[in-house]
Image (cartoon, helix red, strand yellow):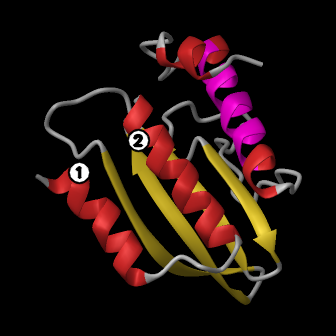
């Protein structure tokens, strides 16, 4: 598995199967390290023909418990987009209400640090709207 420094050096990953796989593996291990839980995807990110969609939306999902999960959307660097934006989304999975923390980011040291904090707090059920708003405001300026 690649560490943060190696992952930050990847550059382009969209439509590059090896780089994309390295990033998916990085997020999977990060999630497990932060939560102590195995990563269990809840989004099938494949085309109808079974080929994986390599666009970063999402690059990672995992169930936390039966009714909550985390979704990470990673984009390549683009000055026209926020470096990080996060929100709580409610959706339906298998006819059941499902809440997810969604984090859309361009990966950097700062966004990784804040994403890690969000994952920990959400997993521990201590993420408050004020904390979420504070982190989002940091990147909106």
Q: Is residue 68 magenta?
A: no
Q: Main structural element of the magenta stretch: helix, strand or loop?
A: helix
Q: What's the residue at 78%, 19% (across, down)?
A: 1
| Secondary structure beneath label 1 | helix
Q: Identify the secondary structure beneath mark 2.
A: helix
Write the residue at 42% across / 13% down: 11
- Residue 108 locus on image (x, y percent): 40, 30
The correct choice, above or below, for 71 with respect to 128 in the image is above
Q: Residue 50, labelled with which disc?
A: none
Q: Is residue 29 within the magenta segment?
A: yes
Marks 2 and 1, how far apart at CA: 9 Å
State the image coordinates of residue 13 (x, y, percent, origin top left): 50, 19
In the image, taking residue 102 as reference, residue 121 lies left or right, namely right
Badge 2: residue crowd in 10 Å (few <14, some 14–19, many ≥20):
some
Q: Residue at x 75, y 40 (%)?
A: 28
**Quick one: 59 or 7, which is closer to the camera?**
7
Q: Quadrant of residue 37?
A: bottom right
Q: Residues within 10 Å of mark 1 (few under 14, many from 20)?
A: few
- The residue pinned by badge 1 equals 139
Res 107 seen here: no
125 vs 50, left or right, is: left
Instruction: Give the extent of the magenta segment.
Output: 19-31
Please tell me whether residue 85 is drawn above or below residue 80 in the rendered image: below
Q: Position of residue 41 (x, y in %)?
A: 77, 54
Could you say which is closer to the camera, residue 137 or residue 46? 137
6 w.r.t. 36: above or below: above
Labelled pair 2, 1 in contact (Cβ < 8 Å)? yes
């Amino acid at each position: 598995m690649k560490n943060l420094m190696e992952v930050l050096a990847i550059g382009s990953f969209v439509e590059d199967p090896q780089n994309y796989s390295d990033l998916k593996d990085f997020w999977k291990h990060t999630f497990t390290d932060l939560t102590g839980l195995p990563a269990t995807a809840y989004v099938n990110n494949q085309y109808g023909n079974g080929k994986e969609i390599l666009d970063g939306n999402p690059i990672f999902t995992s169930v936390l418990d039966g009714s909550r999960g985390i979704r990470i959307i990673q984009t390549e660097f683009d000055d026209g987009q926020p470096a990080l934006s996060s929100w709580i989304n409610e959706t339906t999975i298998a006819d059941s209400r499902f809440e997810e923390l969604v984090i859309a980011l361009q990966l950097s040291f700062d966004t990784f640090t804040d994403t890690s904090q969000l994952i920990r707090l959400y997993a521990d059920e201590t993420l408050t709207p004020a904390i979420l708003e504070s982190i989002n405001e940091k990147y909106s300026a």
